[in-house]
Amino acid sequence: MASERGIRVGNVPIGGGAPVVLQSMTLTPTRDVQATIAQIAALADAGCEVVRCAVPKTEDAEALRMIVRLSPLPVIADIHFNASLALKAIDAGVAAVRINPGNIGGPERVAEVVTAAKSAGISMRIGANSGSLPKHLYELSQVDQAEALVAAALEEVELLERLDYFDFKISVKSTHVPTMIRAYRMLAAKVPYPLHLGVTEAGTPFAGSIRSAIGIGALLADGIGDTLRVSLTADPVKEIEVAWEILKALGLRERGPIMIACPSCGRDNVGVWNLAERVEERLKQYPQHFEVAVMGCAVNGPGEAGDADFGIAGGRDTGFLYAHGRVLKKVSSDILVDELFFEIDRWIEGGMHRPKRLKMAKPAALAMAEASLIPLD
């Protein structure tokens, strides 16, 4: 159930049927303009579409004016505890502000921020976090934390609606993935506003990516969510890389190639993990969307590679290169990867035409056996 309402963060539409938007947060001190802009530029190159900057001090708020001018992405000011910093950030020209009405100083201070945001014509993000629920919801959180998260978010929604302000998105983040999923499902059934998805404090790149993929992916598969952040204890560029893989895996957005690779097993005689890593690293250079399969033996090679735009199946001395469902050539294993990218580049230069595919009727092993008769290039 995608959100009915849409908002804008700068020139980026969020909700109301717009594509799911990827965002991250800088980890530099915001007052260090040069370092912050450099990190924003790296995030933009990775595919980030909206960026958030922490504003814990007055110096950070003052630096936002220059950051907004230089940033290639819409800038959101992340504010906690101090409404005056939100007002300074809005005056500096940010595209949106993220506040927590529960810790910003009471309804009067929220009203000040809303008045300034309305005057500037910018949006806001509000929401609850499992680590900072209001005290009056503590007992409820002990019974059902998901319900407490939704209750906290709805209190904030009601406050903004009373102020006749509707240009906002909502989050209900938790470190516990099942709780996060239930909270967002409950909230999506109650409000028409855009939802910002995330597993808060997800962890290191390995564990955090898995938790985020499960939590965010489950919701997106249900049609819930309009923008997301993968929160990792890592360089924020990694967050965007993981976020894109989540969207690509669900078929929601396209950016760059997709690689599939068979798992390691006793039939592998080429070290398919090394082969896959080499291919994956080189694929990072391509902005075009296409699919490449990397296989280690004859069992899955023809079938799996045949479904991709290009594929390779390795062997001890020779390997096979596939293109659009057909065996293209047999080549020496030491140049297999180079030959793959030679054919990919030639295909791109020719306009990326995809011929009509023929359903493979022969068993994979038989097709590979016949392919082995092809003369070595």
Image (cartoon, helix red, strand yellow):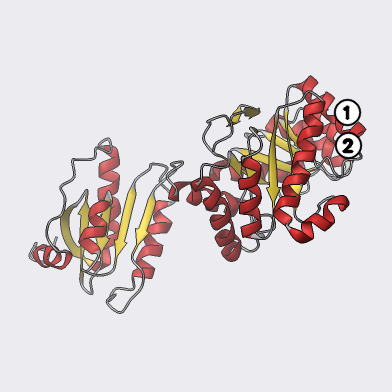
Q: Disc 2 designates what residue? A: 83
Work out whether residue 122 or residue 58 is closer to the camera in this orientation and state it: 122
Quadrant in the rendering for residue 207 = bottom right
Relative height, residue 269 to residue 300 (above, below): below
Residue 92 in sight from this viewpoint: no
Q: Secondary structure at mark 2?
A: helix
Q: Amino acid at mark 1?
A: Glu
Residue 151 percent location from the top left of the image: 76, 45
Left or right of 238, for residue 344: left
Determine which residue is flagged by label 1.
112
Residue 354 location (% of width, % of height): 23, 40
Which quarter of the rendering shows the N terminus?
Answer: top right
Residue 330, given in percent of the width and then of the height, sits at 16, 61
Q: Secondary structure at mark 1?
A: helix
* Badge 2: residue crowd in 10 Å (few <14, some 14–19, many ≥20): many
Is 57 displayed left or right of 26 in the figure? right
Would you say 298 lies left or right of 108 here? Answer: left
The kind of residue tagged 2 is: Ala
Which quadrant does the C terminus fall into? bottom left
Q: Are marks 1 and 2 in contact (CB under 8 Å)?
A: yes
